[in-house]
């Protein structure tokens, strides 16, 4: 049976450009620490910095603004820790440079308020709860974060904790329903209040134009495997002039901002994927194709009685749609589709193991146990869409008959 993969929002296949670049580097057989001055070390350093430049070019930032990490989760944790650790508990303020030598001057005791919506990825929510105390930002029925809701969270933080949040999160786009957030509006509000903003852009990178300088965001986290790069590599992008305490200490790698020997071959793959997306017209062409595919998926799904779309079906990332299915839980639908050769996802991106209702959908006020997320990517074909369209109605019908 042919398989049809429609779970690209979880991870997407490695792009040929990334595979070729990684294989070519591996064939050179050069192994060295890029921090060494010998020839081998300088060869590795040159390859690493070229990859950094490619990543920086995709996001329209300078290479020195790119901190390479092990992926989106580390980038998120680094962003939260980097801000919270620089807070002076007595003054309730953060210096522009953070604390010296990567030694935390503040604390991770949970005393610093961090504003976060329940629609954020679990890595954002959990990191905020571990390193600070979460002040919830309300969202609307599409899962959108409005600047007015952020202003309300700031007011509640000030009333309850005696100070505004030390950090505000606003994802670029929701990882489950695809809704695009008003990042510019949130950043404008927070900039006027002197509050740094972190943007989790993992679900938007490669599909939406992300210009850190234009958005004004202070910290942006991205992950390579979401856009066709390898797993195990990502980046934290910093606003120019911003310094934050490193989460990982013990070395001077990444200009002292992230200790540990760099994942050079992963960075090379990340850079190659970024360079491919930066080719003129490439990203917009892929986005248009993804939109066409997801429109067909929505049409096929919503043709079945009792199936409704979740999130903003217009102002969304082009590769993600989400539907609710009345009368049957999503997990059996997922399994039925899998038996038909179609891979999709139910629930939010990292919670399927817990079998708990989606916090994203619950925050939106919809049923968190009957959602199906469908997502496409650079390798999706019309045959993949046809396979879903041919299987979905039958799977739902059989399950509803069993329930009756």
Image (spheres, rainbow, N blue to C red):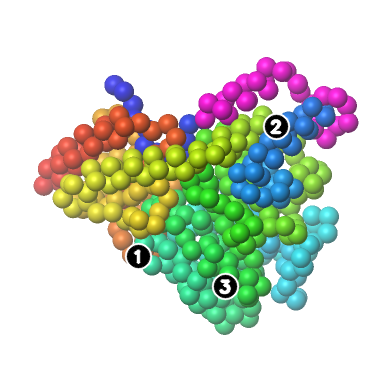
In the rendering, at what x and y percent does residue 363 appear? 39, 63
Determine the residue positioned at 53% across, 50% down: 209
State the residue in front, 336 or 403. 336
- Asked if the stretch drawn in magenta spans residue 30, the answer is yes
Q: Using the image, tell me which numbered label, if any, was put on residue 189.
A: 3
The residue that disc 1 covers is: 141
In the rendering, at what x and y percent does residue 13 appear? 48, 31
State the residue in front, 370 or 268. 268
**Quarter of the rendering containing residue 264:** top right
Q: Earlier in the sequence, mark 2 or mark 3?
A: 3
In the rendering, at what x and y percent does residue 56 appear? 66, 45
Circle nearer the viewer, 3 or 1: 3
Badge 3 crowding class, 10 Å Cα cut-off, few under 14, some 14 to 19, many 20 or more, is some
Label 2, label 3: how far apart the Cα atoms are: 38 Å
Number of numbered callouts drawn: 3
For mark 2, give the secondary structure: helix
The residue that disc 2 covers is: 264
Label 1, label 2: how far apart the Cα atoms are: 43 Å
Decide: is 162 above or below 342.
below
Which residues are drawn in magenta?
15-40
Decide: is 148 above or below 86.
below
For mark 3, give the secondary structure: helix
Q: Using the image, tell me which numbered label, if any, was put on residue 180.
A: none
For mark 1, give the secondary structure: loop
Determine the residue positioned at 75% across, 21% down: 30
Determine the residue positioned at 72% across, 62% down: 85
Q: Quadrant of the N terminus?
A: top left
Decide: is 30 above or below 108.
above
Determine the residue positioned at 52% across, 68% down: 185
Q: Earlier in the sequence, mark 1 or mark 2?
A: 1
Asked whether residue 353 appears in the rendered view, the answer is no
């Amino acid at each position: 049976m042919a398989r049809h993969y429609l779970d690209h929002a979880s991870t997407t296949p490695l792009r040929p450009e990334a595979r070729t670049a990684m294989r070519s580097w591996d064939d050179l057989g050069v192994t060295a620490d890029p921090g060494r001055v010998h020839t081998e070390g300088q060869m590795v350093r040159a390859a690493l910095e070229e990859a950094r430049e490619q990543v920086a070019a995709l996001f329209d930032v300078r290479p020195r603004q790119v901190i390479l990490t092990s992926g989106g989760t580390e980038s998120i944790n680094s962003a939260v820790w980097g801000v919270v650790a620089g807070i002076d508990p007595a003054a309730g303020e953060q210096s522009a440079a953070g604390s010296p030598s990567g030694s935390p001057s503040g604390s991770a005791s949970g005393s610093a308020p961090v504003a976060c919506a329940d629609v954020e990825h679990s890595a954002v929510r959990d990191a905020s709860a571990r390193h600070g105390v979460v002040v919830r930002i309300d969202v609307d029925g599409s899962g959108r974060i409005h600047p007015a809701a952020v202003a309300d969270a700031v007011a509640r933080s000030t009333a309850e904790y005696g100070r505004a949040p030390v950090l505000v999160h606003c994802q670029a786009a929701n990882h489950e329903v695809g809704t695009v957030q008003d990042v510019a509006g949130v950043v404008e509000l927070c900039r006027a209040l002197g509050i740094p903003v972190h943007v989790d852009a993992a679900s938007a990178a490669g599909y939406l134009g992300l210009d850190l300088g234009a958005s004004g965001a202070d910290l942006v986290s991205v992950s390579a495997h979401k856009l066709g790069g390898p797993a195990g590599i990502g980046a934290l992008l910093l606003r120019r002039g911003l310094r934050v305490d490193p989460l990982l200490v013990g070395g001077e790698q990444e200009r002292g901002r992230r200790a540990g020997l760099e994942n050079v071959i992963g960075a090379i793959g990340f850079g190659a994927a970024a360079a491919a997306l930066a080719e003129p017209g490439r990203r917009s062409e892929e986005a248009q194709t993804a939109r066409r595919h997801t429109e067909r998926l929505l049409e096929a799904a919503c043709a079945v009685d009792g199936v409704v779309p979740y999130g903003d079906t217009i102002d969304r990332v082009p590769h993600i749609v989400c539907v609710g299915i009345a009368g049957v839980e999503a997990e059996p639908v997922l399994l039925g589709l899998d038996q038909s050769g179609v891979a999709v996802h139910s629930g939010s991106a990292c919670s399927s193991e817990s079998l708990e209702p989606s916090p994203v959908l619950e925050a939106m006020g919809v049923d968190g146990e009957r959602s199906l997320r469908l997502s496409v990517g650079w390798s999706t074909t019309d045959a993949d869409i046809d396979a879903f369209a041919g299987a979905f109605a039958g799977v739902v019908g059989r399950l509803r008959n069993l329930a009756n």
